[in-house]
Image (cartoon, grey):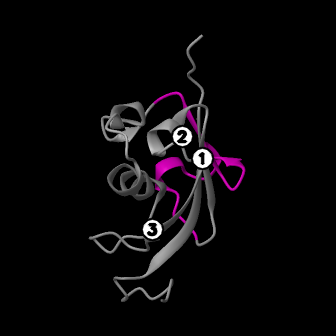
Amino acid sequence: MSNTGAGDSAATIPVVVEFTGGLEMLFADQRRHEVSLAARDAASQPATVSSLIDHLCDEVMQDGRKDLFVLDGHLRPGILVLINDADWELEGEEAYEVQSGDNILFVSTLHGG
């Protein structure tokens, strides 16, 4: 299956997503997930970290406590995101266009004590 065809609505992007700092409990206690993300959304816009977060909540998360990961439609404060080992703030945050083979790490910085 092609990953690049703009006219191919079935094109997907393979992405490795990792969770740590307790977030893995929301995703079946599995730290690493290999995800196939639609290359374009319903409006034919390229896949972004925002659409990845929606996909993770809708398709990957098995825990019902979605509010521990997203709040008001955005990633919850206190979750650090690294895109290919770089802070997502350097990459455009939720607007970053996901690329084939990207490694995206979500780290909760909020821990009970």
Q: Which residue is mark 3?
A: 37
Marks 1 and 3 close (CB-CB < 8 Å) = no
Marks 2 and 1 close (CB-CB < 8 Å) = yes
Q: Nearer the viewer, residue 31 or 81?
A: 31
Q: CA distance from mark 2 to mark 3?
A: 19 Å
Q: Is residue 41 above or below residue 73?
A: below
Instruction: Point out the tag, 2 or 3, that comes first from the N-terminus.
Output: 2
Q: Nearer the viewer, mark 2 or mark 3?
A: 2
Q: Secondary structure beneath disc 1?
A: loop
Numbered badge on residue 50? none
Residue 24 located left or right of residue 57:
right
Q: Which residue is mark 2?
A: 24
Q: Secondary structure beneath disc 3?
A: strand
Q: Which residue is mark 1?
A: 31
Q: Nearer the viewer, residue 108 or 60?
A: 60
Residue 3 located left or right of residue 71:
right
| Amino acid under disc 2 | Glu
Where does residue 44 sit, x and y in percent of width and height? 32, 75
Question: The C terminus is located in which quarter?
Answer: top right
Q: Is residue 49 above or below residue 111?
A: below
Q: CA distance from mark 1 to mark 3?
A: 18 Å
Q: Secondary structure beneath disc 2?
A: helix
Where does residue 48 sit, x and y in percent of width and height? 46, 60
* Residue 84: in magenta span: yes
Residues in magenta, as a range: 77-99
Query: Residue at (36%, 57%) from the top-left corner?
Result: 59
